[in-house]
Image (cartoon, helix red, strand yellow):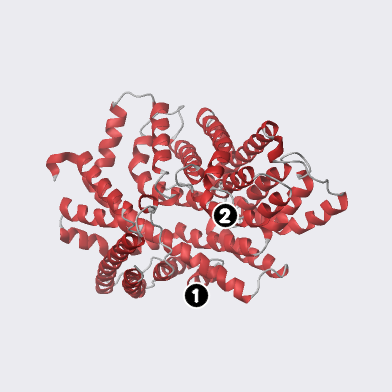
């Protein structure tokens, strides 16, 4: 919820370089939508090929799918964290306002960690519900 | 890996994706995994790790993308704000008394709702909730009623704002305001052809869409008053964008805010509903941006395999007439649309196919015009996937409100609308001016 409202608040302000704040803010806000979406099981899957499969099979496949998601998001989290350190070391800032870019990297990392955790959680639920 | 060549490597990546997708892996992850593995094999694991350091930030901080959550929010407010009821009420009062008129009113309501909502599924769902009970009460057949709503819903992504078009614009680096302008006239043509399809259908099957009572002038005027927020929001957003007052992102923010105020003023939105709207927009945002992350990874690997460049060369060297290539691509989209959703399809295929299209000489169009013309065509074709069997997402959505109508019945009804879609696509293919004229006038 805060995610979307942050974006909304920023987008109407006529300040020099405000779009940089929108950019950085959006990147962080958007990444925090990912774990929420996973908890709501909102990420699209194709169920066309498995309509006739048993509940058990589908539950097992969903478990594997959620585990893969957790693995991928853990990888992304790790690399984005590494990106934050690299950006901090190189002192990269935004063009007009001079905001350090590594702030955004650092704030995005926990969002991806949370998404990985959400993936593990849904994997567990799918396995139990088989 | 280099021994099998770019096309071979590219096909292997695709095969990996399809297998994972068939096994219920979230689509975004089904694209990411073969992409990451392919990248590590084609370059090296270190190169992959290095690439991933900035990949998420680079994509999520693209300024144009901030328009997506805002348009989603605007659609949420419009949906929860009861605006579809007002729109259907007015359209029904005006033409509902004709034979098949209520179905036509539903199409008009979808078109008008599409002007403030960028999603097909949301448009289909919200108009279904108000129009379906009315149509059934007036003895419309389940087949005509559900098919109309499923097809009408596709107007949601054709008529601007359109989330799919924003995504296309970002991937191909086109001006989003110009793309929106290009979609207006095709959107109006689409609605007109749907009305024609309904009128032919009820002439053949008069019992399926009987005429009903006429509304008085006073009723019509009262309903007209209820519709003004929709017109106002539309005019503010697009008037502002084309009048040079604000960028599409700012327009979307203004639109979201005004849709919220409209809902508040009509007492259709309370604090709990507003919370729901934000959460709904956040969930869809999460879904869309995970797809971006996955498709970017797969595309990075495909670029390493040089498949897109080789494909473009092969197409150019094949000696096929350019329009035949375009038709082949569009047919490929129809097929892909049978198993994939429209966003994943576009995010995945545009980076591969777009270079090939740009290399073609079509009616002597310049690069920008060609990109816009092709974008509108692709948009129309992915819409077909939303209502065509075996998996039409819109048909599922409408079915969830009409459990008593078998889905096979809806698909049968949808055929007339697919015919209308085909006519529109042929028109767009033959006369690029339909999409390009307004784009040129509004965004010179």
Residue B444, visible in the rendered structure = no
Q: Quadrant of the C terminus of chain A?
A: bottom left
Residue B205, visible in the rendered structure = yes
| Res. A2 mark | 1
Which residue is at 39% across, 31% downward? B328
Q: Residues within 10 Å of mark 2 (few under 14, many from 20)?
A: few
In the rendered structure, the residue with mark 1 lies on which chain? A
Q: Position of residue A94 (x, y in %)?
A: 38, 67
The answer to whether residue A93 is left or right of residue B212 is left
Q: Position of residue B174 (x, y in %)?
A: 45, 46
The answer to whether residue B45 is left or right of residue B408 is left
Name the outermost residue toward the left.
B3
Q: Residues within 10 Å of mark 1 (few under 14, many from 20)?
A: some
| Position above or below: B279 against B183 | below
In the rendered structure, the residue with mark 2 lies on which chain? B
Toward which corner of the image does residue A9 lie, by quadrant? bottom right
Q: Position of residue B431 (x, y in %)?
A: 54, 29
Q: Nearer the viewer, residue B238 or B224?
A: B224
Q: Name the residue carrying label 2.
A: B403
Cα distance, mark 2 to mark 1?
Answer: 36 Å
Q: Nearer the viewer, residue B293 or A8?
A: B293
Q: Please tell me whether mark 2 sits on a helix, a strand or a loop.
A: loop
User: Quick check: marks 2 and 1 in contact, CB under 8 Å?
Assistant: no
């Amino acid at each position: 919820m805060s995610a979307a409202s942050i974006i909304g608040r920023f987008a109407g302000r006529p300040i020099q370089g405000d779009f940089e704040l929108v950019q950085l803010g959006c990147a962080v806000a958007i990444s925090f939508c990912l774990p929420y979406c996973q908890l709501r099981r909102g990420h699209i899957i194709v169920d066309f090929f498995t309509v006739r499969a048993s509940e058990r099979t589908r539950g097992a496949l969903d478990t594997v799918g959620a585990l893969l998601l957790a693995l991928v998001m853990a990888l992304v989290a790790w690399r984005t964290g590494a990106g934050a350190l690299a950006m901090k070391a190189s002192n990269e800032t935004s063009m007009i306002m001079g905001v350090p870019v590594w702030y955004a990297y650092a704030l995005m990392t926990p969002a991806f960690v949370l998404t990985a955790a959400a993936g593990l959680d849904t994997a567990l639920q799918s396995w139990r519900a088989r | 890996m280099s021994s099998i060549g770019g096309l071979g490597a590219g096909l292997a990546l695709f095969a990996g994706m399809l297998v994972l997708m068939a096994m219920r892996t979230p689509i975004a992850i089904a694209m990411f995994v073969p992409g990451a593995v392919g990248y590590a094999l084609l370059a090296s694991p270190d190169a992959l790790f290095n690439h991933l350091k900035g990949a998420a930030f680079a994509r999520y901080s693209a300024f144009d993308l901030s328009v997506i959550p805002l348009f989603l929010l605007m659609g949420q407010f419009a949906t929860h704000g009861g605006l579809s009821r007002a729109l259907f009420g007015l359209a029904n009062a005006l033409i509902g008394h004709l034979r098949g008129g209520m179905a036509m009113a539903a199409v008009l309501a979808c078109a008008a709702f599409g002007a403030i909502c960028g999603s097909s599924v949301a448009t289909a769902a919200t108009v279904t909730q108000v129009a379906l009970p009315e149509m059934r009460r007036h003895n419309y057949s389940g087949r005509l009623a559900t098919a109309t709503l499923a097809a009408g819903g596709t107007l949601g992504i054709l008529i601007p704002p359109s989330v799919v078009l924003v995504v296309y614009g970002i991937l191909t680096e086109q001006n989003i305001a110009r793309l929106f302008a290009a979609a207006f006239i095709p959107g109006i043509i689409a609605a007109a052809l749907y009305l024609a399809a309904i009128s032919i259908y009820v002439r053949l099957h008069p019992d399926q869409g009987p005429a009903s009572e006429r509304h008085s002038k006073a009723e019509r005027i009262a309903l007209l008053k209820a519709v003004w927020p929709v017109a106002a929001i539309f005019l503010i957003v697009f008037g502002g964008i084309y009048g040079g007052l604000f960028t599409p992102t700012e327009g979307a923010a203004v639109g979201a805010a005004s849709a919220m105020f409209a809902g508040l003023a009509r007492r259709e939105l309370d604090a709990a509903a507003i919370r729901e709207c934000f959460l709904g927009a956040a969930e869809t945002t999460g879904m869309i941006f995970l797809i971006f992350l996955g498709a970017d990874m797969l595309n990075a690997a495909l670029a390493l395999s040089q498949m897109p460049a080789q494909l473009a060369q092969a197409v150019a060297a094949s000696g096929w007439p350019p329009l035949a290539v375009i038709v082949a691509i569009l047919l490929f989209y129809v097929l892909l649309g049978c198993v994939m959703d429209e966003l994943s399809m576009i995010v995945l295929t545009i980076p591969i196919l777009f270079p090939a299209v740009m290399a073609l000489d079509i009616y002597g169009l310049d690069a920008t015009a060609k990109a816009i013309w092709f974008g509108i065509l692709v948009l129309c074709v992915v819409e077909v996937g939303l209502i065509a069997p075996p998996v039409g997402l819109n048909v599922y959505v409408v079915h969830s409100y009409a459990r008593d109508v078998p889905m096979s019945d809806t698909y049968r009804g949808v055929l007339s609308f697919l015919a209308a879609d085909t006519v529109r696509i042929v028109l767009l293919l033959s006369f690029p001016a339909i999409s390009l004229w307004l784009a040129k006038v509004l965004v010179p």
